[in-house]
Amino acid sequence: MLFRSDAGQLPDLILLDLKMPQMDGIAILDAIRAERGLDGIPVVMLTTSGENCDIRESYAHGASAYVVKPMDFKQFREALRTIQAFWTALNRPPRTN
């Protein structure tokens, strides 16, 4: 089991970086997609790499979107707002019931 909150609630969205210590983003993405109940949660890769091979690999492993992380803090904040607005307000996933 990769993730379960004490409240029993799952996240609406997961932001995931490719480059992390101990376990890279693709390995975590694979674990999320393999876990029943987590497999339908949108996962946005938010990383500094704009390399086509990283983008292709992320989508091949089940990423919902890929965003190159802006280095400027103001632009980074705006990118986070845009991601949040799209996935929580504009996007319409299928109903589970």
Image (cartoon, helix red, strand yellow):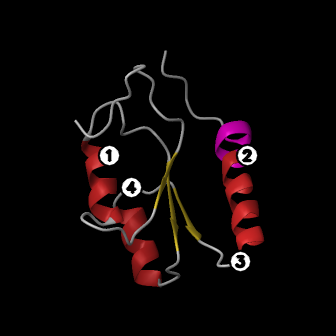
> Left or right: where does residue 23 sit relative to residue 83?
left
| Mark carried by residue 62 | 4
Amino acid carrying mark 2 in the image: Ala
For marks 1 and 2, the one nearer the N-term is: 1
- Asked if the residues shown at circle 3 and circle 4 are in contact, with their CB atoms under 8 angstroms apart, the answer is no
**Magenta-drawn stretch, dominant element (helix, strand or loop):** helix
Real-space Cα separation, disc 4 to disc 1, in angstroms: 9 Å
Task: Indicate the amino acid at tag 4.
Answer: Gly
Q: Which of the two discs, 3 and 2, labels the residue nearer the N terminus?
A: 3
Question: Neighbour class for label 1 at 10 Å: few (<14), some, many (≥20)?
Answer: many
SS of the residue under disc 3: loop
User: In which quarter of the view is residue 4 placed?
Assistant: top left
SS at badge 1: helix
Precedes in sequence: disc 2 or disc 4: 4
Name which residue lies at 64% across and 44% down. 87
Mark pair 3, 4: CA separation: 28 Å
Location of mark 1 (residue):
32
Sequence-first tag of 3 and 4 = 4
Picture coordinates of residue 69, whole percent (x, y): 60, 72
Residue 51 part of the magenta segment: no
Relative placement, left or right, of 88 versus 68 is right
Q: Amino acid at mark 3?
A: Asp
